[in-house]
Image: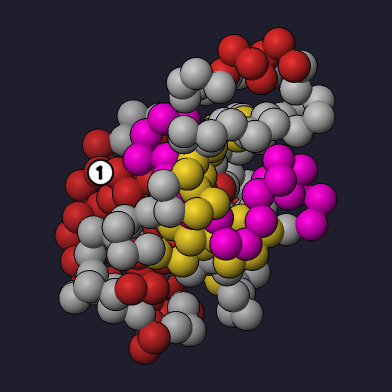
Amino acid sequence: MTRRSLIHAGIALGTAAAFPPGMAQAGETAHDVTYVEDFDELWRTLDERYCYFGEKRTDWRAVRRMYRPLAAAAQSSEAFAGVVGRVIGELYDAHTHLNDPAPDAARGPYFDLWVEPNRDGTAFVTSVRDGSPAADAGITPGYSVLAIDGRPIGQIASDIIPRCLSRPDPAATAFALNVAVSGRRGMPRTLTVRSTPGYAFSSPLQAGLFYVKKRRIEFQSICSPSLAKALTKQDHTVPI
């Protein structure tokens, strides 16, 4: 990703423009600019134009110290785009994102669920987008998300949470959980959720859905009676 491609891809910055028009030179070619120069331009642009540093606990200079060496080490445009994504993630702002992310990049919130942190490290669903995969799966506000594709959501969020905070920020934790539950672009995911304490079910976010609850099984009518009978004996996660 060169300066020209970075500018053309663009970064959405809330209400602020990411890059002023005309910044790229007409004769600039791909080999004229290094990833480090791209990184420095990105960092300076955000430093000068991002509107909400006053509301964040992001140590922006620490971001430069951490990620500039990674940009220098990038061996491909895809690797550099990954560094850029992590830099933007340090702002934990759903309105600040690449306009042209990689096909398998993490989705930003609000994709289909909005969650808030639970004390036990899980995520409490407060909103479900109408017509979304989560809504089609029967997830409603009041559920808690325990895991995604079998991995505890707290572990996933810990990989996402910003590394350059001056001090902990609950908003950063909430952002990481919301990125986690959103999954990745172009990829299905399976959420394990709890409706009430002590009961959980796994629901693939695809057509053809079922509910599996601990110690008690409840199925939608699309589930065959034979399958329901088989699953009442123990917990199962069954791909549909």
**Residue 100 shown left or right of residue 158 in the figure:** right
Q: Which residues are magenta?
A: 130-152
User: Which one is nearer the viewer's eye here, 42 or 192?
Assistant: 192
Above or below, 167 against 111 in this view is below
Q: Is residue 131 magenta?
A: yes
Q: Is residue 210 visible?
A: yes
Furthest residue in direction bottom, as rendered: 54
Is 115 colored magenta in this rendering? no
Q: What quarter of the picture does the C terminus occupy?
A: top right
Residue 34 to residue 59: above or below: above
Instruction: Specify whether residue 27 is in view.
Output: no
- The image's colouring method is secondary structure
Nearest the viewer among 141 and 71 is: 141
Give residue 22's quadrant in the image.
Answer: bottom right
Q: How many marks?
A: 1
Nearer the observer, 148 or 4: 148
Q: Position of residue 76 (x, y in %)?
A: 40, 30
Q: Give the answer, above or below, for where 234 lies relative to 126.
A: above
Residue located 58% across and 66% down the image: 126
Instruction: Please give the residue where the numbered disc 1 appears in the rendered image.
Output: 70
For badge 1, the amino acid type reads Leu
Residue 229 x, y percent position in the rendering: 64, 16
Q: Position of residue 8 (x, y in %)?
A: 63, 52
